[in-house]
């Protein structure tokens, strides 16, 4: 199946205290790890940048499948980046992954693709995580959502299908310096699986 992916990487990283997309995890940046998790299942990966967009472009310049797009309204929050990303989609379905969720394995993406539904969400021990698989037929509706909405509200309104996965990585995001310190020492094993 021809499928595209969106990585959201436009935020200020305010809770981390430094630009987290360039923080290193086992020799590669956080944004590289997130992009590489999509690489084996996506024909194209759209990275939505905002804050420090030139740095994102520099980091990802050697990734052939990646197109970095700029969200000029990134200060409005993540939903504005979702809208910029989905407006670039050309395939029947697409994955949506926040750029600070770097540990998702290929088997999770493949399991989501095996499930029918307009919106498919992975679940680990009753907790919903990322990535989200969305049918492109919903793009117009998402774009029509008001600025004070968000993707969670839209998904809850439309309904969704869940897929149980045996991978806690769908829940692990790097939001703070503490998260980074907790996960970075043992991260090498995560990428060798």
Image (spheres, rainbow, N blue to C red):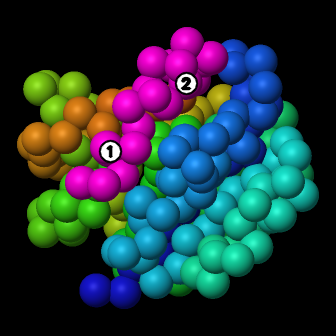
Coordinates of residue 5 in the picture (x, y in percent):
48, 67
Residues 85 and 109: in front is: 109
Residues 115 and 104: in front is: 104
Residue 87 against residue 148 in the figure, above or below: below
Q: At 40% from the left edge and 44% from the top edge, which residue is drawn?
A: 188
Residue lying furthest top in this view? 178
Q: Secondary structure at mark 2?
A: helix
Judged left or right of residue 80, residue 95 is left
Q: Secondary structure at mark 1?
A: helix
Magenta part of the protein: which range? 175-193
Residues 66 and 152: in front is: 66
The quarter of the picture where residue 156 lies is top left
The quarter of the picture where residue 110 lies is bottom left
Residue 189 against residue 185 in the figure, above or below: below
The quarter of the picture where residue 150 lies is top right
Residue 42 against residue 134 in the figure, above or below: below
Judged left or right of residue 84, residue 108 is left
* Location of mark 2 (residue): 180
Residues 63 and 136: in front is: 63
Q: At 82% from the left edge and 48% from the top edge, which residue is drawn?
A: 50
* Location of mark 1 (residue): 190
Calculate the distance from the C-alpha at mark 1 to the C-alpha at mark 2. Answer: 14 Å
Judged left or right of residue 167, residue 26 is right
Secondary structure mostly seen in the magenta stretch: helix
Q: At 36% from the left edge and 86% from the top edge, which residue is drawn?
A: 2
Coordinates of residue 161 in the picture (x, y in percent):
17, 48
The answer to whether residue 81 of the structure is visible from this angle is yes
Say few, some or many: other residues with alpha carbon within 10 Å of mark 1 (under 14 / 14 to 19 / 20 or more). Answer: some
Q: At 52% from the left edge and 53% from the top edge, which residue is drawn?
A: 33
């Amino acid at each position: 199946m021809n499928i595209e992916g969106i990585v959201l990487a436009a935020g200020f990283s305010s809770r981390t205290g430094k630009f987290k997309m360039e923080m290193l995890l086992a020799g590669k940046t956080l944004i590289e790890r997130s992009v590489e998790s999509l690489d084996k299942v996506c024909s194209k990966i759209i990275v939505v940048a905002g804050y420090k967009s030139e740095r994102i472009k520099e980091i990802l310049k050697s990734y052939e499948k990646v197109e970095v797009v700029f969200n000029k309204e990134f200060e409005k929050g993540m939903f504005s980046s979702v809208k910029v990303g989905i407006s670039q989609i050309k395939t029947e379905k697409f994955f949506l992954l926040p750029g600070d969720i770097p540990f998702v394995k290929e088997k999770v993406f493949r399991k989501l693709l095996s499930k029918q539904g307009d919106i498919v969400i992975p679940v680990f021990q009753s907790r919903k995580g990322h990535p989200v698989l969305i049918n492109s037929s919903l793009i117009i509706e998402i774009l029509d959502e008001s600025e004070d909405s968000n993707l969670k509200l839209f998904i809850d309104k439309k309904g969704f299908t869940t897929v149980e996965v045996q991978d806690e990585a769908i829940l692990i995001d790097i939001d703070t310096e503490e998260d980074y310190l907790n996960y970075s020492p043992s991260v090498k094993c995560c990428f060798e699986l």
